[in-house]
Amino acid sequence: MELEGKSALVTGGGRGIGRATALALARQGCAVAVCARTREEVEETARQVRGAGGKALAFTADVSLEADAERVVAETISQFGGLDILINNAGVFVLASVLETPVEEWDRLMAVNARGAFLFSRAALRHMRERRAGAIINISSTAGKRAYPEQSAYVASKHALLGFTKALALEAQPYGIRVHAVCPGVVATQMSAVTHADRPDRMEPEDVAQAVVYLLSLSPQAAVDELVLRRNGAVPWSS
């Protein structure tokens, strides 16, 4: 896909991987919409996108709410004249054993990490199917491919996201829509600081953003279903 002139929507775009991805897409010539729950964060991302020379929209939204997903996608299409790229990046985390995980926390992680991607993908897919073109990238995790102790809710939500990505890809491909998953390991974000704050070898959000740009830039003759990113020094083929 030629990215110059394309329009993109990034959920969880207020900081970390979402902000880095929004900026990377803007530098490639995309108009970028970002959404997150905190207004100040998404407005700062939009300001940086404009500073990089791109068009930007900022929305506050709860990705787990159907009305918010429909509103953000519809407004992005209206303002940009279409939607070519959706990046489902919004995610939350909790560190707790199975016995210590409240039901409310389990439901919250499933709602944001899995349901949110479903809602935004469904809203975007209607538009992309009509145009018979588009790309959807879901930011999963190595936790979507293996298990970690005291992360049962997060692991379950990321496995759900990866399963949804596979099913969505099968439904979308006949309409010329590409669906990918990016599964990063430990990235230096506010979320990973809960478990890996003392690790100096964490990947940077920009590493994931570069992977997103790579997937989107592939020729129409090539497709990568899933891209696993590990930090340099981690065990190869360990996920």
Image (cartoon, rainbow, N blue to C red):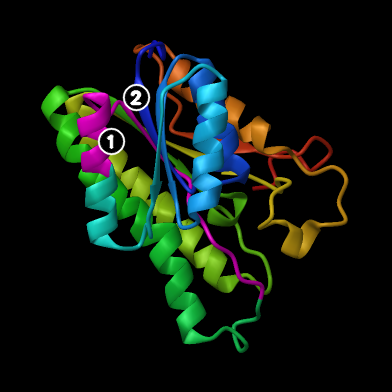
The single residue placed furthest to the bottom in the displayed view is 99
What secondary structure is found at the residue carrying circle 2?
strand
The stretch of residues the image draws in magenta is 73-95
Q: Secondary structure at mark 1?
A: helix
Disc number lying in front (1 or 2): 1
Q: Position of residue 138 (x, y in %)?
A: 44, 43
Question: Are the residues tagged 1 and 2 within 8 Å (C-beta)?
Answer: yes
Image quadrant of residue 230?
top right
- Regarding residue 195, the answer to whether it shows in the image is yes
Q: Earlier in the sequence, mark 1 or mark 2?
A: 2
Instruction: Choose top left, top right, bottom left or bottom right for residue 124.
Output: top left
Disc 1 designates what residue?
Answer: 76
Type of the residue with mark 2 = Ser
Q: Residue 83 vs residue 138: left or right?
A: left
Q: Residue 84 is drawn in which quadrant? A: top left
Query: Which residue is the extreme one toward the left?
Result: 130
Return the x and y of residue 12 as percentages of the image width and height.
49, 48
Q: Is residue 82 left or right of residue 43?
A: left
Three-letter code for the amino acid on which mark 1 is drawn: Thr
> What residue would you read off at disc 2?
7
In front of the other: 110 or 28: 28
Q: Residue at x 67, y 65 (%)?
A: 148
Q: CA distance from mark 1 to mark 2?
A: 9 Å
Q: Could you tell me which residue is drawn at 20 percent across and 32 percent down?
A: 78
